[in-house]
Amino acid sequence: AAGIKKSDESGIVLLKAKASNLSPVSFSQDKAVMGTPLFLIGIEQGVSGPLYFMNSGIIKSIDGSLIETNMIEDSSSVTGVPLLDSNGDVAGIASVNSAGYVFGISADAIMQFIR
């Protein structure tokens, strides 16, 4: 995959993959609202193979294009995992701060970047 666009400010990179039969994702059309339920689902390499993980929480605060959740993760492998809303749409892209709290770049900011 080749990077075709990047934002140093947000850390988002748009990639062009040379692959077919990939399933597209839908981005949430709703503006981020405090109290909205979010889900984090991912996979990382464990000692004996793939390790699947899930977490759930709510949007705790909104600061411009950043949404902070009340989820805590102790793994940096969460960075880049989608934050999903209750419809299964991408509400943001997750990252973890130094205290372990999951925050994300909102779907609205991601869509503005893609355009």
Image: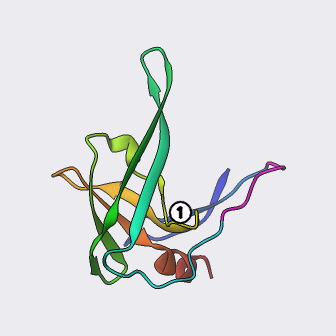
74 horizontally vs 77: left or right: left
Residue range of the region highlighted in magenta in the rendering: 19-25
- On the image, the x and y values in percent for residue 105 come to 40, 70
26 or 114: nearer the viewer: 26
Tell whether position 110 is magenta. no
* Secondary structure predominantly adopted by residues drawn in magenta: loop
Q: Position of residue 83 (x, y in %)?
A: 46, 60
Q: Is residue 12 left or right of residue 14?
A: left
Q: Position of residue 39 (x, y in %)?
A: 44, 57
Instruction: Tell me, yes or no, whether the highlighted magenta stretch contains residue 20.
Output: yes
The residue positioned 31% from the left and 79% from the top of the image is 34
Residue at the (15%, 52%) spot, across then down? 99
Above or below, 21 against 105 in this view is above
* Residue 2 position by quadrant: bottom right
Q: Residue at coordinates 44% horizontally, 53% vertically from top-left? A: 40
Q: Amino acid at mark 1?
A: Val
Q: Quadrant location of the C terminus?
A: bottom right
Question: What residue is shown at x 47% (from left), y 79% (from top)?
Answer: 109
Q: Position of residue 47 (x, y in %)?
A: 42, 16
Disc 1: which residue: 13
